[in-house]
Image (cartoon, grey):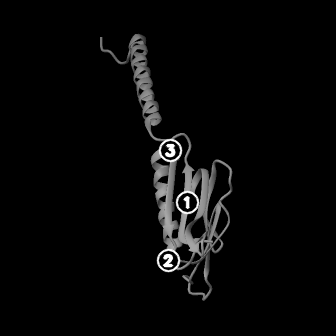
């Protein structure tokens, strides 16, 4: 007698083996996806912070005038870069609530530099100057920015930039 198919026992055993293998494969995929860093984690936040500081530093060095309406906003004016004979306005701002983005507005185009900022502060540095016998402070040519970014694994950054063409407000 020749055999033409599988018995019921063979089918049940083979389905059991396939089920165990599928569960093992699914568990492996689940564990490996949990091991991946989440978006906005430490390395991504540090890289975004570095890029933001490079852009900010370049803009500050080119600025012909600087305004700081508050500690969370820095407005720079740079010479014409678009060829329309009008100076460019660049504004760096943070809304002030933890988790809000740090943005750069170039003329009217808004770009998010860091998606989640915890704290941010711009400060114009001053230096002492002696006139007669009184010490007075005068604006210097430096601006300091300090901020904390990220969620969970925070990135704290403080940088100081020198204005080449203007004075701090």
Q: Nearer the viewer, residue 46 or 36?
A: 46
Q: Secondary structure at mark 2?
A: loop
Q: Residue furthest bottom?
A: 85
Q: Which residue is mark 2?
A: 164
Vertical placement of 8 versus 107: above or below?
above
x then y, percent, for residue 121: 61, 57
Horizontally, residue 135 falls left or right of residue 28, namely: right
Label 2 vs 1, first from the N-terminus: 1
x then y, percent, for residue 148: 56, 50
x then y, percent, for residue 20: 42, 20
Residue drawn where x is 66% and y is 72% of the image: 108
How far, Cα to Cα, is label 1 from label 3?
22 Å
Q: Secondary structure at mark 3?
A: loop
Determine which of the numbered discs, if any, sits on residue 114 in the image: none
Horizontally, residue 115 falls left or right of residue 95, namely: left
How far, Cα to Cα, is label 2 from label 1?
17 Å
Binning the other alpha carbons within 10 Å of mark 1 as few (below 14), some (14 to 19) or many (20 upward) gives: some
Q: Secondary structure at mark 1?
A: strand
- In front: label 2 or label 3: 2
x then y, percent, for residue 67: 65, 71
Binning the other alpha carbons within 10 Å of mark 3 as few (below 14), some (14 to 19) or many (20 upward) gives: some
* Location of residue 152 by image quarter: top right
Q: Nearer the viewer, residue 88 or 16?
A: 88
Residue drawn where x is 59% and y is 75% of the image: 131
Q: Residue furthest front?
A: 133
Image quadrant where one finds the C terminus: bottom right
Image quadrant where one finds the N terminus: top left
Determine which of the numbered discs, if any, sits on residue 41 in the image: 3
Determine which of the numbered discs, if any, sits on residue 145 in the image: 1
């Amino acid at each position: 007698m020749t055999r033409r198919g599988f018995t019921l026992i063979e089918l049940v055993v083979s389905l059991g083996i396939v089920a165990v293998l599928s569960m093992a494969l699914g568990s492996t995929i689940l564990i490996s996806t949990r091991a991946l860093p989440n978006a906005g984690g430490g390395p991504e936040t540090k890289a975004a912070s570095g890029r933001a500081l490079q852009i900010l530093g370049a803009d500050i060095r080119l600025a012909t005038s600087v305004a700081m309406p508050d500690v969370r906003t820095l407005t720079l004016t740079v010479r014409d870069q678009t060829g329309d004979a009008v100076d460019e306005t660049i504004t760096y701002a943070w809304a002030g609530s933890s988790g809000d983005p740090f943005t750069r507005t170039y003329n009217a185009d808004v770009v998010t530099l860091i998606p989640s900022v915890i704290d941010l502060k711009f400060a114009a540095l001053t230096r002492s100057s002696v006139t007669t016998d009184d010490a007075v402070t005068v604006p210097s040519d430096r601006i300091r920015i300090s901020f904390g970014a990220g969620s969970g694994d925070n990135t704290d950054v403080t940088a100081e930039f020198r204005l080449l063409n203007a004075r701090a407000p």
